[in-house]
Image: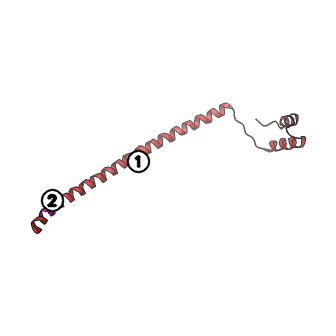
Amino acid sequence: MPIDTHQVFKHLKRDEVFSEEQADRLADALSEMDVASATKEDLNEVEERLNNRIDELDERLTQRIELSEERLGQKVEGIRSSIVSAVAAVGAVLAVVIPLSIYLFG
């Protein structure tokens, strides 16, 4: 719905908000603008599309987070296993070195 610049001019001049020249210039500026308008139905459709898009993105992000958590859990488990193995190896070495040291150095 285009702006009725004549009505704008009349209201600005009538309400003594602007001088006649100011009101005329403002009306001219408004007439040169490319103004688009939307109905409530248009806005509701856009809102619905945006909500659907947000829901889709939320689902995708949830899936990615769950996958990342799973991968991270696997890596943590692998690291934990490596640490347990390393501690066991150190324990085995100490089990040999300590008695050997006692035997050798008394």
On the image, numbered disc 1 is attached to which residue? Answer: 68
Disc 1 element: helix
* Picture quarter with the C terminus: bottom left
The picture quadrant where one finds residue 86 is bottom left
The picture quadrant where one finds residue 40 is top right
Q: Nearer the viewer, mark 2 or mark 1?
A: 2
Q: Position of residue 105 (x, y in %)?
A: 11, 68
Q: CA distance from mark 2 to mark 1?
A: 40 Å
In this view, 66 is above or below 81: above
Looking at the image, residue 41 sits to the left or right of residue 51; the answer is right
Tag shown at residue 95: 2
Residue found farthest to the front? 106
Q: Position of residue 16 (x, y in %)?
A: 87, 36
Q: Amino acid at mark 1?
A: Ser
Residue 78 vs residue 40, the one in the foreground: 78
Instruction: Decide whether the magenta segment is chiefly helix, strand or loop.
Output: helix
In this view, 77 is above or below 55: below
Q: Amino acid at mark 2?
A: Ala
Residue found farthest to the top? 41
Name the residue at 73% across, 39% down. Answer: 36
Looking at the image, residue 78 sits to the left or right of residue 106; the answer is right
The reply to whether the magenta stretch includes residue 106 is no
Q: Position of residue 74 (x, y in %)?
A: 33, 49
Q: Could you tell which of marks 2 and 1 lies nearer the N-terminus?
A: 1
The picture quadrant where one finds residue 46 is top right
Which residues make up the magenta segment? 93-100
Q: Position of residue 25 (x, y in %)?
A: 86, 44
Disc 2 element: helix
The reply to whether the magenta stretch includes residue 96 is yes
Label 2: few (<14), some or many (≥20) within 10 Å?
Answer: few
Looking at the image, residue 8 sits to the left or right of residue 45; the answer is right
Tag shown at residue 12: none
